[in-house]
Image (cartoon, helix red, strand yellow):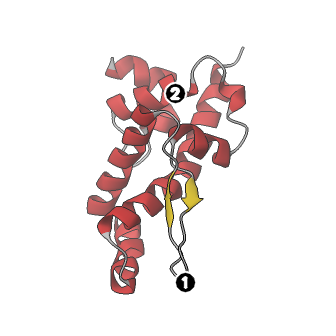
């Protein structure tokens, strides 16, 4: 399966933290109609990574959108975990968030949404090259 995924989606497969399984899941989520992914926000909403306000009083928080493709959300979660552990840019992003007092769960939620633009750009480029 890995060679087929790399051939079909080379840009998506080349992203940091994206292996063949994650790339295959993202391709499956986009499906036969990639035109429905008209923006990064649409992809985030489809993957269930779009934040929804869940504030109470003075506390301003967001929670994940529970609808959407849970497998695609898991793919974004895998990318975020990999980047959080091994990518220096992401680690530089995470450290100040920890000092701000955010929990790991909240940081992962932010990272999932933070990775969507990279994934969207790669998926869009891969689907553009596939089009006849």
User: Up-down: is 84 above or below 17?
Assistant: below
Residue identifier under label 2: 29
Which of the 4 quarters of the picture holds residue 85?
bottom left
Mark 1 and mark 2: span between their CA atoms? 37 Å
Q: Is residue 80 visible?
A: yes
List x then y, in percent, for residue 129. 65, 25
Label 2: element kind: helix
Nearest the eye: 120 or 46: 46
List x then y, in percent, for residue 52. 57, 57
User: Up-down: is 128 above or below 97?
Assistant: above
Image disc number at residue 119: none
42 horizontally vs 58: left or right: right
Residue identifier under label 1: 58
At 73% from the left edge and 38% from the top edge, which residue is drawn?
38
At 38% from the left edge and 60% from the top edge, which residue is drawn?
108
Please identify the residue farthest to the top as the structure is shown: 132
Q: Quadrant of the C terminus?
A: top right
List x then y, in percent, for residue 114. 51, 59
User: Up-down: is 114 above or below 21?
Assistant: below
Q: Quadrant of the N terminus?
A: top left
Which of the 4 quarters of the picture holds residue 31?
top right
């Amino acid at each position: 399966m890995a060679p087929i995924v790399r051939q079909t989606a080379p840009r998506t497969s080349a992203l940091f933290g994206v292996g063949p399984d994650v790339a295959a899941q993202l391709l499956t989520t986009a499906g036969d109609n990639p035109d429905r992914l008209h923006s990064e926000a649409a992809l985030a909403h489809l993957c269930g990574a779009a934040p929804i306000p869940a504030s109470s009083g003075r506390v301003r928080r967001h929670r994940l959108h529970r609808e959407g493709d849970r497998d695609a959300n898991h793919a974004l979660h895998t990318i975020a975990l990999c980047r959080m552990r091994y990518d220096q840019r992401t680690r530089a992003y995470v450290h100040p968030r920890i000092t701000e007092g955010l929990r790991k769960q909240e940081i992962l939620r932010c990272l999932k949404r933070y990775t969507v633009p990279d994934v969207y750009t790669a998926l869009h480029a891969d689907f553009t090259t596939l089009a006849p």
